[in-house]
C-alpha cells in the first residue's frame, strides 16, 4: 500500500519550486497509536510529505522519464510537533538537478511557522537496471500524485494573464 501525504499542490514552478498542503484529520490511522490522547504527526511522515512534494518536482523537471527515489536525507531539523487538526504546507526548492539525481531544500510550515526543515537527495535510477529490479511500473509517480500535479497545472493556467494583456 502506498500512502499519499499531499492533499493538493498550491504552487508549482517547473524545475524551481513547489508548495503542497496536507490537512491532518484525527480520523487518520496513525493518530490512534501516535500517541493515544495526544495525536502527534510522526516526523517521518512529515519528511515523507516533503519528499513526495520534492520528488514530483524533480520528476516533472525531466518529464517523468526517470524513476526518482529518495536517496538520503543528510539533514532534518524539527522545531515542534504537529497535531491532528492542523494544516501543513510543504515547500521545496530545487537546488541541483543532474543526470544521476537531484537535491532539494524543504520546509514544513503550519500557517507561517516553520515546523521542520530538511535537505533531501534523490537518485535517478538507470532505466534498464530499475526495470530488472522493480519491473515496468513506475512506483514513484503513481497516478494519484501525477493527478494532483495536473490539477495544480490547470489552476496555474487559469490564473496566467492572457497573451498581450
Image (cartoon, helix red, strand yellow):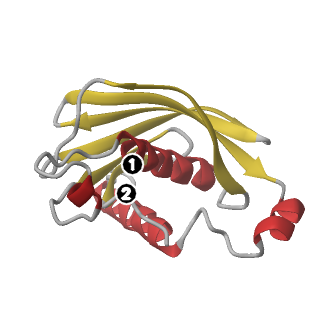
Residue 119, compared with residue 98, is above or below; it is above
Residue 147: horizontal and vertical position, in percent?
A: 44, 71
Is disc 2 in contact with disc 1, using a CB cutoff of under 8 Å?
yes
Residue 106 location (% of width, % of height): 44, 33
Q: Secondary structure at mark 2?
A: loop
Task: Please say whether residue 13 is visible from this viewpoint.
Answer: no
Within 10 Å of disc 1 (Cα), the crowding (few <14, some 14-19, many 20+) is some
Q: Position of residue 160 (x, y in %)?
A: 34, 54
Residue 75 visible to an observer of this rendering? yes
Query: Going 73% across and 57% down the picture, which residue do you hit?
Result: 66
Quadrant in the picture for residue 28: bottom left
Say few, some or many: other residues with alpha carbon within 10 Å of mark 2 (under 14 / 14 to 19 / 20 or more). many
2 vs 1, front mark:
1
> In the depicted view, which residue is nearer to us: 77 or 31?
31
Give x and y (percent) for residue 162: 34, 57
**Residue name at image x 58 percent, y 55 percent:** 60
Along the viewing direction, whichever of 156 and 95 lies nearer the viewer: 95
Q: Which residue is mark 1?
A: 45
Question: From the viewer's perspective, is 59 left or right of 149?
Answer: right
* Circle 1 SS class: helix
Q: Image check: 67 left or right of 47? A: right
Residue at the (42%, 43%) spot, across then down: 44
For marks 2 and 1, the one nearer the N-term is: 2
Q: Tell me, for residue 5, which label it has, or none.
A: 2
Image position of 108 with respect to 137: above or below: above
Is 156 displayed left or right of 82 in the figure? Answer: right
Q: Nearer the viewer, residue 163 or 41?
A: 41
Question: Residue at left 81%, top 66%?
Answer: 133
Distance of label 2 from label 1 (alpha carbons): 7 Å
Amino acid at each position: 500500500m502506498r500512502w499519499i501525504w499531499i492533499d493538493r499542490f498550491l504552487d508549482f514552478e517547473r524545475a524551481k519550486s513547489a508548495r503542497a498542503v496536507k490537512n491532518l484529520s484525527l480520523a487518520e490511522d496513525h493518530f490512534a497509536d501516535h500517541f493515544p490522547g495526544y495525536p502527534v504527526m510522526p516526523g517521518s511522515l512529515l519528511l515523507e510529505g516533503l519528499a513526495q512534494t520534492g520528488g514530483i518536482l524533480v520528476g516533472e523537471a525531466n518529464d517523468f522519464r526517470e524513476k526518482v527515489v529518495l536517496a538520503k536525507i543528510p539533514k532534518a531539523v524539527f522545531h515542534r510537533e504537529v497535531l491532528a487538526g492542523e494544516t501543513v504546507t510543504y515547500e521545496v526548492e530545487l537546488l541541483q538537478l543532474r543526470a544521476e539525481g537531484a537535491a532539494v531544500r524543504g520546509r514544513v510550515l503550519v500557517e507561517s511557522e516553520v515546523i521542520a526543515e530538511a535537505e533531501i537527495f534523490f537518485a535517478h535510477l538507470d532505466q534498464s537496471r530499475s526495470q530488472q529490479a522493480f519491473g515496468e511500473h513506475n512506483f514513484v509517480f503513481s497516478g494519484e500524485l501525477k493527478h494532483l500535479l495536473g490539477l495544480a497545472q490547470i489552476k496555474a493556467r487559469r490564473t496566467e494573464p492572457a497573451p498581450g494583456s
